[in-house]
Amino acid sequence: MSAPGVLSFTQQGWEQVLAKVKWALVYLDAACAESLHWGCGSTRLLEAVGGPACHLREFEPAAVGGGAEQPKAVFVLSCLLKGRTVETLRDIICRSHFQYCVVVTAVNHAVHLTANHVPAAAAAELEGQPVFEQLEEKLCEWMGNMNYTAEVLHVPLLFAPVAPHLALTPAFASLFPLLPQDVHLLNSARPDKRRLGSLNEVDASALPPELLLQIRCLVSGLSSLCEHLGVREECFAVGSLSRIIAADLANYGPAKNRRKTATGRASVVFVDRTLDLTGAVGHHGDNLLEKIISVLPQLPGHTNDVMVNMVELTALQNEEKNQSMVAPGCLAQSK
């Protein structure tokens, strides 16, 4: 993996977001906040927003809306603009006074068409981005005036580059390979089709729609990275779910034109987590990072960072009442 390539890919994505946030309230979901945390830091975002007040908020149903003096909002989301996500958008906007809304999604329009059951043949003939355009109309409707401004755009905020040659995908922290006992559940969900005997017989057509969409979102992001690197990928897989993901990336329609013009080549190896657990569960303490992560408490809202007690670097006594007075340090901010 090219260290400068992955880091620049992440930072390039965030630069597109930063260009939209001037004087805006910014709502982020947990996965995008983690990508920002490792990619360029919240300080960079606050500088782009400007103003003395704190303009960052968590994207959740109970999030505080914007007042009359806050007419602009930017929502940065890692997920599909569908279902509960759209409901949360509506609820926040309806209790606010926004006149300008920007929604950034890490999932591209092609995957949104798949999520809306648009056949591949029909999707290829569509002009523009109808799913995003329809949501823009809804945003204006929720703001209360169709003459207000709404934008919906895709920016591939997939990675959290934690080290020069290591990048994680916070939005897919819960994506886990199928286990042997899952074969029974798959068979129960498709009683009219041929029964599956083992995980080796599982293909994309046997997976639940939600898991298929999650895989397609991952594939979309990986394809965007390959485009940024200018490479034509060759996929290899170890494990049943990895085999499905590799096949989906190899057959991903929007990537066909990219592969024709790519000047470089790259090998992409997918490995199921269940086949790579020996070191992860050993706790041998072979390196300092492993000891740090296993001993220190997790940073709230993050899957890959920990809290470092900074009270000992101050004149305060290291007592429980002082713990909340000084913000904790973390691995992503080493300076």
Image (cartoon, rainbow, N blue to C red):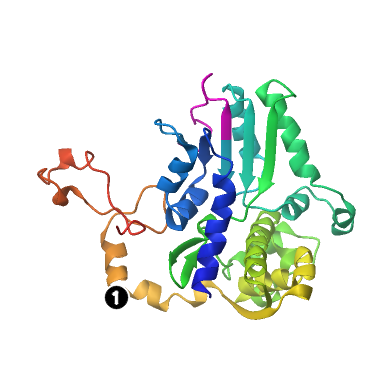
**x and y percentages locating residue 31 in the rendered image:** 51, 51
Residue at point 51% right, 21% down?
69
Labels in figure, total: 1
Point out the image quarter for the C terminus.
Answer: bottom left
Q: Is 82 drawn above or below residue 41 in the view shown? A: above
Q: To which quarter of the image does residue 263 belong?
A: bottom right
The residue closer to the viewer here, 289 or 248, is 289
Magenta-tinted stretch: 57-73
**x and y percentages locating residue 168 in the rendered image:** 49, 64
Q: Amino acid at mark 1?
A: Asn
Q: To which quarter of the image does residue 282 belong?
A: bottom left
Give left or right: position of 34 versus 283.
right
Residue situated furthest top in the rendering: 68
The residue closer to the viewer here, 4 or 120, is 4
Check disc 1 and report the residue beneath it.
Answer: 287
Residue at point 44% right, 71% down?
164
Q: Is 27 drawn above or below residue 252 in the view shown? A: above
Query: Is residue 301 in the magenta section?
Result: no
The residue closer to the viewer here, 122 or 27, is 27
**x and y percentages locating residue 6 in the rendered image:** 53, 67
Q: Residues within 10 Å of mark 1 (few under 14, many from 20)?
A: few
Q: To which quarter of the image does residue 172 belong?
A: bottom right
Element at badge 1? loop
Residue at point 23% right, 42% down?
326
Q: Main secondary structure of the magenta part?
A: loop
The residue closer to the viewer here, 289 or 103, is 103
Residue 162 in view: yes
Residue 59 in view: no
Give left or right: position of 8 versus 47.
right
